[in-house]
Amino acid sequence: MALFKKEPTQEDQLQQNLRAWLSQQAGKTIALANLNAFFYQNDFFKLHYFAESGFQADNKQPVLTATVTKDVQKKLSRIKETELSSELKINKKEKSLLDGIITSDQNYFRLYVTPSPFATGLLLLEKLPATKVFQADKKTGSFVQNNIKELLYLCYRFDLAKNPQLAVKNLALAQLATPSVTLPILATLTAIANQTIADLDLEYLFTWVLQYSATITATSTLFSAYASAALPEEVLEKTQAIVTELAENFARSSTVLTQNANQDSLAISEQLLKQIPDLFQAANQKMTALNDKLLNSDTDQTE
């Protein structure tokens, strides 16, 4: 009887990569932002890690650097795959399994893991299929749901790029120095999940998403070409207007867009769609150059 080896899932691969990455950091002091960056480089934006020191809630301080223990491999071997899998699917703030592997000499140090705003939005979005508007046309509803997921992704990527310490300090979206574009999306998704949005308003929202699906997909695809939280300044500059418009109009569309606002957004959308192919090509070239540089670096070290 032929035996077939089970191909590792994306989650299996992520676990393997995480264990390998932590093992490589044994005994080193790391920036905790680099722990989050590891997940971004593996195209995983559903959680983030942050650390605090202090005993009482009113005197807790964010910790930005920590040390990976020298016996990291031994401690990692004690964490079951199912346990780590649960951490990767976290839906509320908890003390991380990696606390004790990632340590600090600061008093009452704790490493936490929490779902990202992107993951929170995905959880809210799961309520969309239960609405009457979705049920009336499930095929269109599924298409709209996927587009909202893409919109949520690109808005969160934009927030991360504009606010580099968002994750490592576990900053609230409402308190960001640069106004969050994810927050309006979450507000509308919360209304959908709580069934406080009228069917007519939800129909308008579906219509708006269908109208802007090309822009949403193009921008999301552009951002996904960069395997890090950072996005080039040129990309941020050229996409800021449309990302802001998309976020604001998504929230506003549930209370009916005005004709003028709709026309203004369409003009910006058309302008961006003309720019995106060049931006995307530039992104691919930069990522290819980076991969070549890393490959050459590994080759040099081997030799």
Image (cartoon, rainbow, N blue to C red):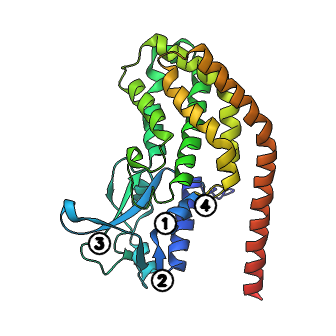
Residue designated by label 2:
28
> What is the distance, in whole Å, between disc 2 and disc 4 at their CAs?
20 Å
Q: Secondary structure at mark 3?
A: loop
All told, the count of numbered labels is: 4
**Identity of the amino acid at label 1?**
Ala
Residue designated by label 3:
109
Task: Residue at 54%, 33% (x, y): give it.
Answer: 247
> Residue 267 sits in which quadrant?
top right
Q: Is residue 205 left or right of residue 87?
A: right
Quadrant position of the N terminus in the picture:
bottom right
> Are the two marked residues, 1 and 3, in contact with CB atoms closer than 8 angstroms?
no
> What is the distance, in whole Å, between disc 3 and disc 4 at their CAs?
26 Å
| Nearer the camera: disc 1 or disc 4 | 1
| Nearer the camera: disc 1 or disc 2 | 1
Q: Dot 4, how many residues are within 10 Å of its Cα: few (below 14), some (14-19), or many (20+)? A: few
Q: Dot 1, how many residues are within 10 Å of its Cα: few (below 14), some (14-19), or many (20+)? A: some
Q: Dot 3, how many residues are within 10 Å of its Cα: few (below 14), some (14-19), or many (20+)? A: many
**Identity of the amino acid at label 4?**
Gln
Residue designated by label 4:
41
**Identity of the amino acid at label 2?**
Lys
